[in-house]
Image (spheres, grey):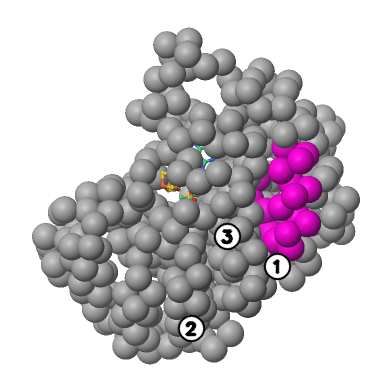
Amino acid sequence: MKNLGIYVHIPFCRQKCNYCDFYSVNWNDESEDKYIEAVINEIKGYRDKLKGKYKADTIFFGGGTPTIIKPENLSRIKEGLSDILEIEKQSEISMEANPNTLTWEKLKGYKEIGINRLSIGIQSLNDEILKKIGRIHNSLEALEAIDRAKNIGFENINADIMFNIPGQTVKDIEDTLYKIIERGVKHISFYSLKLEKGTPMYAMEKNNKIIMPDEEYERDMYYAGREVMAKNSLFQYEISNFAEAGFECRHNLKYWNQEEYIGLGPSAHSFLNNTRYSNPSDLKLYCECGNSRNFERIILEELGKDDLMFEYIMLRLRLTEGLNVKDFNNIFSADFKKIYSMQINYLIKNNLLEVEGDNIRLTEKGMDISNYVIEEFME
Ligand SMILES: C[S@@+](CC[C@H](N)C(=O)[O-])C[C@H]1O[C@@H](n2cnc3c(N)ncnc32)[C@H](O)[C@@H]1O
Ligand code: SF4
């Protein structure tokens, strides 16, 4: 049986943050119930495709804000899944969390239904910055949420931290990271703020209400953050992700290893049988259809061998361990060094790629301009 990752998109937030364009709408009790029914129906629609062929080894409740949902409703989704496929005993079951929604009761409930990894959106521990970006919690509430989760027995905790925020300083970043690490988080996703079209911050920048840090300072913040994490044994394993050994996110590793997963819920993406597709970003449509077979999935790409090879390179180079040439040759029955000899030589000469044994990976300089390096393999 093949392994499968399951992503469940929970499309609700208490309030939209000023920078975020993930698909979510305002929550209420009634829409939670309708949404849960729709997800359970969508799962049933996968029965023939998955039963007896796949077993789930990672489940990721992402969002939106999954911690808005009652534990018993998440448990219903889990039960729906176990009706159509085996869920491995040692599965990693993650959920994203907003500190504002992490009450003691909810945390206890999530633990009881088998959630074993929390990814908490902390973003910053500077209250002014939190206000500016529209967060609904302050720094104290964020730290208390981590403490509560730890006291209830969550060992595997990630904190999302953002840098490159207007007004933020290198010192802010360092302070935030030190305090978070001191609290015992084992994993940090360290994201550079990207202004997304349609968000309030995007408009503010266009109207000169905020000024983004320049490129050099953006890198300074990144390097400073990386140094704090390295000093504290949080090792970088992907461009934006750092973890204590053994605490890397198994679900996200599936994305970078080009492994199969299905995405449930509005806007969720899937990769199955070499095809990438997504559900519509529309909760009403998603719920109205009631049965997954009635809504049109959007086929994004059916990948042929060349597409798969390019995508594999693009994804694997995001990882600090890089791409293993033997693995590549086995997976694609191809000769990596022969196909890409020109690109490899050029990139090594320019100190953008390096080789260690059978692995080819980005150098530090290469990581800074990873998009450019990856484009070289497109030709
Ligand atoms: C879907 S959110 C999940 C966490 C939870 N909803 C919360 O915010 O507390 C995932 C993470 O993506 C990051 N993120 C969202 N929009 C971003 C942007 N425009 N630029 C950089 N990072 C962003 C934030 O760090 C956020 O915590
Ligand atoms: S960052 Fe999290 S809480 Fe904020 S709008 Fe996005 S999904 Fe919702």
Residue found at the far top of this picture: 208
Give the number of callouts.
Answer: 3
Q: CA distance from mark 3 to mark 1?
A: 20 Å
How far from the left and from the top, in percent, is residue 110? Answer: 47, 75
How far from the left and from the top, in percent, is residue 79? Answer: 34, 84
Neighbor class of circle 3 (other Cα within 10 Å; few <14, some 14-19, many 20+) is: many
Q: Which residue is mark 3?
A: 145
Q: CA distance from mark 3 to mark 2?
A: 18 Å
Q: Nearer the viewer, mark 2 or mark 1?
A: 2
Q: Amino acid at mark 2?
A: Glu
User: Is residue 53 shown above or below 238?
Assistant: below
Q: Amino acid at mark 3?
A: Ala
Q: Amino acid at mark 1?
A: Phe
Q: Are marks 2 and 1 in contact (CB under 8 Å)?
A: no
How far from the left and from the top, in percent, is residue 158? Answer: 63, 59
- Which residue appears at 70% of the width and 67% of the height? 247
Q: Which is more toward the observer, 335 or 215?
A: 215
**In the visual, does 98 lie left or right of 25?**
right
Q: Which residue is mark 2?
A: 112
Is residue 279 at all visible to an observer of this figure?
Answer: no
Quarter residue 65 falls in: bottom left
Location of the C terminus by quadrant is: top right
Q: Which is more toward the observer, 311 or 41?
A: 41
Magenta region: 173-192
Q: Which residue is mark 1?
A: 247
